[in-house]
Image (cartoon, rainbow, N blue to C red):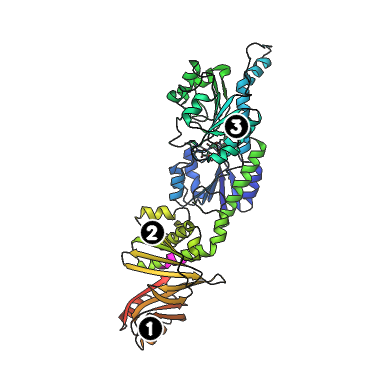
């Protein structure tokens, strides 16, 4: 039975889903050394923001097939390392959107009305109505940096409170911003105009310390900043200084450069600062949503099914997978075949999508072709996640072309591989019942189904040669399931494609190449 490690607190509903297919071990708060020690036993890892999944942990996870992040941000996972190792990384892109947006709005209003401090003072026995004169958000300007899922919901609600919304997001269209009632602006304008600034972007090299001493200096003195996105987008030291010196009015932070927050001057800024311990996603509803979303994907992947929100399989959503499944099988088979024909070190793979196939999303088909190509060398280590990277690391040049005018079959796929042992090409198509046919080998027309054990020859088309090959195979007790000859001109060059019921015994291939008229012979296992 598969084993899943759950390394952060996850709602029970997720554990129940995982338990349908796996042994589930819940071990939260493990130090990194412990995690490295036990990770080799596990097929899947499910976590939240509390676990840092480093390259070292990933490399130790030799059985890992999937890492599931029960939430949005995958910045605590070394995704490139997982991708190299062929491990699918999935998240729950929408499960906690509302929770994080509502936390942001709660932070904005709490900051404006000093609710945390006023509450603490009443609980301490005081009745101080003078120290907590707040300000309204009504008719104020909110600058939203990152108008994605959470930023959009924040903007929509803030709009209903009669705030004016400026948004900065270079990847969002003006039409979308218009629909949300937001004005798209550049950062300089947003910094200069906003009374509140809220961050809803991922932490990337571009967004790290986006809020720093220089950008803080461009803001209004009354500005309040809310960060419920990621620690490190704000330079905390610069923020402390800006608040202390009165350059800005305050900040509400849910996320920090170091989590848990250690010793920090942020704790000493009184009612101007609100700090919460990364609670954005901590609602009952969000935790149920993300647990179901991610546990289902882990379960599916362990059952050999596709994941619906993998962050490291480009363009391969389950819908696409379902639609293209027969073509992906075709591409993998042809990739495997041409890889074995070209042999040894492959330098270049050309993938040509022909006929109706020229109209579909080619990326998954190219990836499937590469997966097939590398499957002899890498076996089960190559998959849809790492195929492209593995090809790149091996210096294999991938050329993709399309030709809608080829009409031999409604759609066909042509692969050509240049390897250390030569250049070969194959074409294949699907019959209406979904069966694969190899329709062309090195530009010779044939029509054979792929089979486990195949023999291909390049020979001179002359009487007796087929008989000789047949009797040679017979003398080694190899049964022929089907045989096809393809030629362009009579008595010219030709190819023979044989499907064999048995693998070719050692030594037989060299015997075949000795037959007069045989130029080359290849065995292939599909
Ligand atoms: N505090 C918490 O507990 C939670 C935090 N988050 C964090 O909130 C953030 C936003 O999450 P979602 O809205 O779900 O993500 P999303 O992917 O829907 O939106 C992110 C937006 O940021 C934009 N963006 C990317 N780079 C940018 C840049 N350099 N400048 C401006 N905009 C840029 C993108 O175009 C996108 O529209 C993420 O960092 C996520 O990890 C999410 C859930 C809970
Ligand atoms: O989903 C996210 O990106 C979050 O930051 C939520 O983090 P959490 O799952 O509560 O540790």
Height in image: 100 above or below 25? above
Q: Which residue is drawn at 37% across and 77% down?
A: 457
Q: How far is mark 2 from mark 1, CA to CA?
A: 36 Å
- Per the image, the residue denoted by label 3 is 279
Q: Is mark 3 within 8 Å of ligand 1?
A: yes
Q: Is residue 333 left or right of residue 432?
A: left
Mark 3 or 2, nearer chain start:
3
Q: In this view, does 119 lie to the left or right of 54?
A: right
Magenta extent? 333-337
Ligand 2 is in which quadrant of the figure? top right
- Per the image, the residue denoted by label 2 is 399
Q: How far is mark 3 from mark 1, CA to CA?
A: 73 Å
Mark 3 or 1, nearer chain start:
3
Q: How crowded is mark 2: few (under 14 residues within 10 Å), some or many (20 or more)?
A: few
Answer whether residue 399 is visible to the viewer in this image. yes
Mark 2 or 1, nearer chain start:
2
Q: Residue at x 42, y 54 (%)?
A: 388
- Per the image, the residue denoted by label 1 is 469
- Please say whether residue 362 is one of the residues in the magenta stretch: no
Q: In which quarter of the image is the N terminus?
A: bottom right
Answer whether residue 232 is visible to the viewer in this image. no
């Amino acid at each position: 039975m598969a084993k899943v490690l759950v390394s952060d607190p996850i709602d029970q509903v997720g554990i129940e889903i995982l338990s349908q297919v796996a042994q589930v071990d819940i071990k939260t708060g493990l130090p990194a050394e412990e995690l490295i020690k036990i990770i080799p036993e596990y097929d899947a890892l499910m976590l939240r923001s509390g676990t840092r999944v480093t390259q070292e942990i990933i490399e130790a996870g030799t059985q890992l097939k999937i890492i599931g992040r029960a939430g949005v941000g995958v910045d605590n996972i070394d995704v490139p390392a997982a991708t190299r190792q062929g491990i699918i990384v999935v998240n729950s892109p929408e499960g906690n959107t509302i929770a994080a947006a509502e936390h942001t709005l709660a932070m904005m209003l709490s900051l404006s009305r000093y609710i945390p401090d006023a509450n603490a003072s009443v609980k301490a026995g005081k009745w101080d109505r003078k120290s907590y004169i707040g300000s309204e958000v009504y008719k104020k300007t909110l600058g939203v940096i990152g108008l994605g899922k959470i930023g959009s919901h924040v903007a929509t609600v803030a709009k209903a409170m009669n705030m004016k919304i400026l948004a900065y997001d270079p990847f969002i269209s003006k039409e979308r911003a218009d629909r949300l009632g937001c004005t798209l602006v550049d950062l300089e304008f947003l910094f200069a105009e906003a009374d509140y600034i809220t961050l809803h972007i991922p932490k990337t090299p571009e967004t790290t310390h986006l809020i720093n001493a220089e950008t803080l200096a461009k803001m209004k003195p009354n500005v309040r900043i809310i960060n419920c996105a990621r620690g490190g987008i704000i330079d905390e030291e610069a923020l402390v200084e800006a608040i202390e010196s009165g350059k800005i009015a305050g900040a509400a932070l849910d996320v920090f450069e170091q989590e848990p927050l250690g010793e920090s001057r942020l704790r000493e800024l009184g009612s101007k600062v609100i700090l919460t311990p990364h609670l954005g996603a901590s609602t009952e509803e969000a935790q149920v949503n993300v647990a179901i979303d991610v546990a289902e994907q882990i379960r599916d992947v362990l059952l050999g099914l596709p994941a619906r929100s993998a962050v490291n399989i480009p363009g391969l959503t389950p819908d696409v997978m379902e639609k293209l499944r027969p073509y992906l099988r075709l591409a993998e088979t042809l990739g495997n075949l041409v890889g074995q024909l070209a042999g040894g070190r492959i330098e270049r793979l050309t993938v040509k999508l022909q006929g109706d196939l020229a109209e579909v999303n080619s990326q998954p088909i190219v990836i499937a072709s590469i997966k097939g190509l590398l499957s002899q060398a890498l076996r089960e280590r190559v998959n849809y996640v790492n195929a492209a990277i593995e090809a790149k690391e091996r210096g294999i040049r991938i050329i993709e072309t399309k030709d809608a005018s080829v009409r031999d079959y409604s759609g066909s796929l042509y692969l050509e591989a240049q390897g250390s042992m030569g250049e070969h090409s194959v074409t294949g198509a699907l019959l209406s019942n979904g069966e694969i046919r190899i329709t062309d080998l090195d530009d010779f027309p044939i029509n054979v189904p792929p089979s486990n054990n195949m023999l291909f020859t390049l020979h001179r088309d002359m009487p007796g040669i087929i008989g000789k090959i047949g009797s040679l195979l017979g003398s080694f007790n190899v049964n022929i399931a089907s045989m096809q000859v393809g030629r362009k001109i009579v008595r010219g060059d030709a190819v023979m494609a044989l499907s064999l019921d048995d693998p070719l015994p050692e030594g037989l291939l060299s015997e075949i190449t000795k037959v007069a008229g045989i130029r080359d012979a290849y065995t292939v296992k599909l």
